[in-house]
Amino acid sequence: MQIISLPSQAAITYKFFWDGFSPSVKKHGTLFVDKGKISARSDINTSTWDYSNYCLLPALIDGHVHLVLPETGQNFAERLRSYLNSGVYALRDAGNKQGFVKISEPCLVLQSGFALYKEGHYGSALGIGVSTPDEALAAIDNLAAKGADQIKVMASGIFSFQHYGKTGAATFTVSELKQIVKRAEAYNLPVMAHASGDEAVRRCLEAQVTTIEHGYFMSKETLRQLATSEIFWLPTLAPVKAQLADPRLAVKLTPAMYDVIKRSYERHSRLVGEAGALGAKIVAGTDAGAPGVEHGRSLAWEILLLHEAGLPLQTALKAATATAAQACRLTASGTLTPGKKPYILAVEGNPLENPAVLQKPVALFLGAN
Ligand SMILES: [Zn+2]
């Protein structure tokens, strides 16, 4: 895997080319970069990078990670390298106890700093507790001043591995969530809302958050509402699947817990397929840092799980490119269309036919800032 800083003018030849959203690839051509952006011009006289045996597509975006987790193992720089080596140039951090982290690698990290959780409820491992709307709004003012890229809010607990269908209670009221969204929007910041259980998801939909994270155990009616809204959904399949698929984790589960998690996963995966059929805006987020979910490599796995859940490959790939860029408000990238910054991934075959090619990317081109 090569990581290549592109000069402001460049030409890259390709065998296949996927722009990040179209239903098919283009074959045998050249992608041009001019003045640091992808260009429609084809008369640019510049040095050529020969990738005529490979497929070019947008570099990938992971919409939900926890950079500081787990607390042992790789350091931040190593984790960021893992993303780049996996073809992921942008990632959205979903909050942590330490707040903002220093970024040492050429990754685009969208930081939440501290997640906001309701005092006395789930979330103390990911951020700061607030008891009243005024405290929440003051925390948003503070996060915005420190350079947050979005506001992460914990609108519920997590789902139970012991009791099928049981989720931690919804925490913030609709009115509180609406105030949070309004204040975040005053700073032009999107709101990413952790929500599991039907009630929490419904509250988030009503409050018009930007993205719903997880969404385990929402009802079919709520799923329909989500699918017809402008709100993005990050179903984060990987952290649940890892409990079943990673032998180091599965061995710790009682047979009853294994069964609860398996049924929960199957229900969630079915919902993803139904959401896709209803036209929901689905985004790939790995929850990397959760047990068994590796930084970087897991995104190709999440894309595969989205596809296995029933999304057409094109939709599953869009979930980590064009749709992810919309959800994360990365207006300058996410597709390979004229005017966008050249964050480009090279892989060995057509990912619209074989997503496994994402597991061994060949090169990541990073545009000049
Ligand atoms: Zn998370």
Image (cartoon, grey):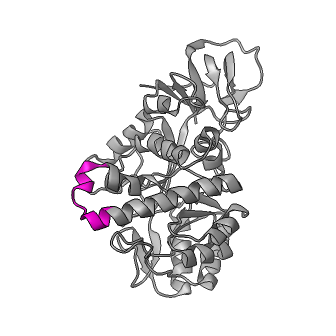
The answer to which image quadrant residue 240 occupies is bottom left
* Residue 160 against residue 60 in the figure, above or below: below
| Quarter of the image where the N terminus is located | top left
Residues rendered magenta in the picture: 246-258
* Residue 239 against residue 177 in the figure, above or below: above
Magenta stretch contains residue 250: yes
| Residue at (60% x, 78% y) in the render | 177
Residue 185 in percent (x, y) is at: 67, 68
Magenta stretch contains residue 305: no
- State the residue in front, 244 or 19: 244
* Residue 197 against residue 316 in the figure, above or below: below
* Residue 288 against residue 144 in the figure, above or below: above
**Magenta stretch secondary structure, dominant:** helix
Horizontal side, residue 362 vs residue 38: left or right? left
- State the residue in front, 341 or 335: 335
The answer to which image quadrant residue 320 occupies is top right
As drawn, the residue found furthest toward the bottom would be 132
Residue 369 in percent (x, y) is at: 58, 36
Q: Is residue 354 visible?
A: yes
